[in-house]
Image (cartoon, helix red, strand yellow):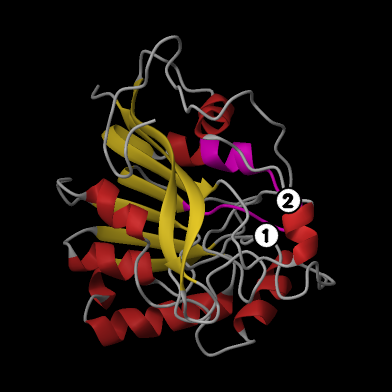
Amino acid sequence: MSAMGEEHTAAAPGPVADGTGPGRPVHGHGPGHGQSPGAGYGTGPGGTGHGSGPGHGLGGQGGEEARPVSDAEYWDSRYRERHHIWSGRPNAALLRHTEGLVPGRALDLGCGEGADAIWLAGQGWHVVASDISQVALGRAREHARESGVADLVEFQRHDFAESFPSGAYDLVSAHFLHAPHDMPRDRILRDAAAAVAPGGILLIVGHAGVPPWAPAPIRENPPELPTPREVYDGLALPADAWEVLVAEEYDEPVTDPEGRPAVRRDNTLKVRRRPA
């Protein structure tokens, strides 16, 4: 693996070498991104990360909660717990891995309250930002208006297990597509890859470990999280059509739910579709 944020071509053999050892089975991950509200798998108030899809985060305060009738109701109820779930700052990995890219069309999967989409728009990108939660999308639209970029961001509601934004994009960004219940994560990420235009970038950022503030039951029996190699294999990309730029696991400085500095283990896969 490279140093955090440093681009590299994957080592042989094979297109991806993530340095994390043998592959592990993956379960319980679904569309959406960010870290779960509360002490479960997220940063809590003031922390980094944002968003949701049909599911995001890996457990809330005190562990698994009873699920409402639908995924949309589940995430709407989570967003209603507080006026702001996320910090309002864009994800650090997005800033690192879009440096030097020429702004074009971007797709933000699981946009949540809109921090990543708004930041991209501020850099000159035209953004389609999607989430399953109408509550989150309402906040995101308001934040985009307040930031003066509402004309550069189109917010769409999608349950990625059932529908997906149309179009081709120069950047498709999927941060923290984890869920506390089973979702077709690999298929959704393949849909994300299919939406990348020739010469465009697919950026997938996920958790690689349990944060130190997670409840004891989660620390003692942590979820099995995909490595960059497993994410790449799940995409089933034609090797001659894609170039691996980054496949890394690293410690990400974050703020814990009590507002204290902490470190969370994350990983990133960044691939580029070769020009036609």
Asked which secondary structure carries label 2, the reply is loop
In this view, 221 is above or below 27:
below
> Residue at (63%, 64%) from the top-left corner?
41
Residue range of the region highlighted in magenta in the rendering: 175-190
Q: Nearer the viewer, mark 1 or mark 2?
A: 2
- Left or right of 65: which side holds 242? left
Residue 145 colored in magenta in the image: no
Residue 177 x/y as whole percent: 56, 52
Residue 138 x/y as whole percent: 48, 82
> Residue at (66%, 78%) from the top-left corner?
78
> Is 71 or 204 nearer to us in this picture?
204
Residue 181 colored in magenta in the image: yes
For disc 2, the neighbor class at 10 Å (few under 14, some 14 to 19, many from 20) is some
In this view, 199 is above or below 123:
above
To which quarter of the image does residue 38 belong?
bottom right
Give the labeled residue for mark 1.
58
Q: Amino acid at mark 2?
A: Pro
Marking on residue 222: 2
